[in-house]
Amino acid sequence: MRLNVENISDKDRLKLEIKNKMKPIEANVVGCFWKNINLYFDYSDMTRHTFKNQVWQFYFDIGKKLANKNIKEIDDVAIKTLLKDSKKSLEKYVEFGEYNTIEKLEFFVTVDNAESYIGELKKWSALYDIIDKVYLDDVNDLNQFSDLNSNELYDFVMAHINNIFINSDDGIESFEIQDGLDEVIDEADKGVNVGMPIPSKILSSEIGGVIDGQIILFGGLSGTGKTTITIQLLLAACFEEEEPLVVMLNEQDEKLWKRELLTYIINNKLVQNDEKMFAKKRWRTGGFTEEERSLLNQAKEYLQEKMKNNKIILIHFKSYSRKQAERVIRKYSSLGVKKFILDTFKLSSDRNDNEQTWLSLQEDVRKFDDLVKPSNLNVNLWMTLQLQKGSVLKRYLTGDNIGLGKNVLDTASVTILMRRVRNDEYAGEKNEIKVIQPIGGSLKSGKPIELNPNKKYVILFLEKNRNGESQSYQIVAEQDLSHLVYKEVGITDIPFDT
């Protein structure tokens, strides 16, 4: 390591040479990002500090701001609209050649090479930072080394270099464990680890609500109401709390979710009389009565009023791809969205055909977990998934009922499995289940509840729960699929299958 104390210009010359080397690389990266604006979300760790030339710092920043404003394609009009209130930025835009500078680039760059361009850019950027931060500028800087021995000097220099490379790597940050402990304690005291409550009191209390930075897996058999219960719990909670939400769909279309939410509003917010409830099947049969039409219009107005201060976005995948889902999460998290639903999690269309099914599913959940964790985007992802068909024979559901992909549970923070209460589990039947309504927060004692044989119920199995208990008891809830009404009844203890 050369310590330059005499010829200061050597350092500046080296930095200038590296900046000149970086110019075409920076141009290629910016050209790719502007040609495909989604790259801003794919490489959300990229910042202006990676660039060392002012022109490309400027253009990178402009593109990022436009991407965050949900602009689909960058053009001169969009740029001037963005810069109209900043005279200094507009002058820079003109000075740097306006949109013509980018148009020339877009003709030559190949977006498929973006990863290679970015890798090269990070390499030269790291070398620039080494010269800038590790070389000494002045003879006076030698004073700080007066009391160091050779080993301590080595540690000093290597600490600087390691810090440069650690922070130039994707998604890696380093912390001293003893630092910031007051902040950790103060944050916990304010209740920052409490998630958004959902309309299922026992379940919400046990899992701590919907906590950012976690994945919640919700599994059930086909046709048992996974989507419906997701609407009843998470969509309804975001709607009531006016919490932004993005719903990614790959099976049901967006019109179904709109119909479901309007039905939910009518039966849970507008109508108190069971006889006047609006049944989901009326969407299919049509021919609304005057009263039904009035209720639907009231629900529409109720929904529109709620959305004045909030956003619930529905994204429909024609062909589900994990990479597309990641891009959606990156994009909308940059716009402030913290809650996401993926309905339904399954094999990605862009998977490696040579990879085993279970390994593909496991790897996809791992990548989702890396994306949403607190150290990255810090958002919550609720994913529904289908249990294997043989699960219909089981009374007690476990991760094994997911089939070959059961290892997807390893990275999820919470896993909830659901089945319907069977006819022989009602009062007086062969396999009657005992349900109690907990009193005073105790789960060991409570008021006995008899299930109504004229109603339908579901059992929720907390298979995994990093935020509280799991596998200790099961939650029983009334679920009216026809009217989208969910009412938690109590808890039970289902015996393991023999």
Image (cartoon, rainbow, N blue to C red):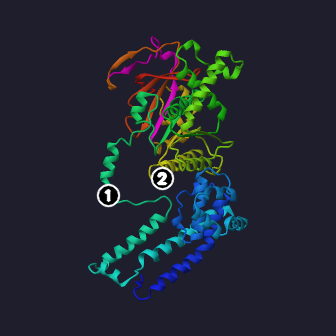
Q: Nearer the viewer, residue 94 or 313?
A: 94
In front of the other: 298 or 257: 298
Q: Is residue 430 above or below residue 402?
A: above
Residue reaching furthest to the bottom: 6
Q: Is residue 393 above or below residue 291?
A: below
| 318 left or right, relative to 215 | right
- Which of the numbered marks, if any, corresponds to residue 179? 1
User: In the image, residue 236 lies at what x, y percent?
Assistant: 52, 31
Residue 494, quarter of picture:
top left
Magenta stretch: residue 32 in it?
A: no
**Quick one: label 2, few (<14), some, or many (20+) residues within 10 Å?**
some
* Quarter of the image where the C terminus is located: top left
Residue 258 in view of the camera: yes
Q: Amino acid at mark 1?
A: Asp
Mark 1–mark 2 distance (CA, rounded to whole Å) = 20 Å
Image location of residue 497, percent across then percent down: 46, 26
Residue occupied by mark 2: 376
Please provide the residue range marked out in magenta: 413-439
Nearer-N-terminus badge (1/2): 1
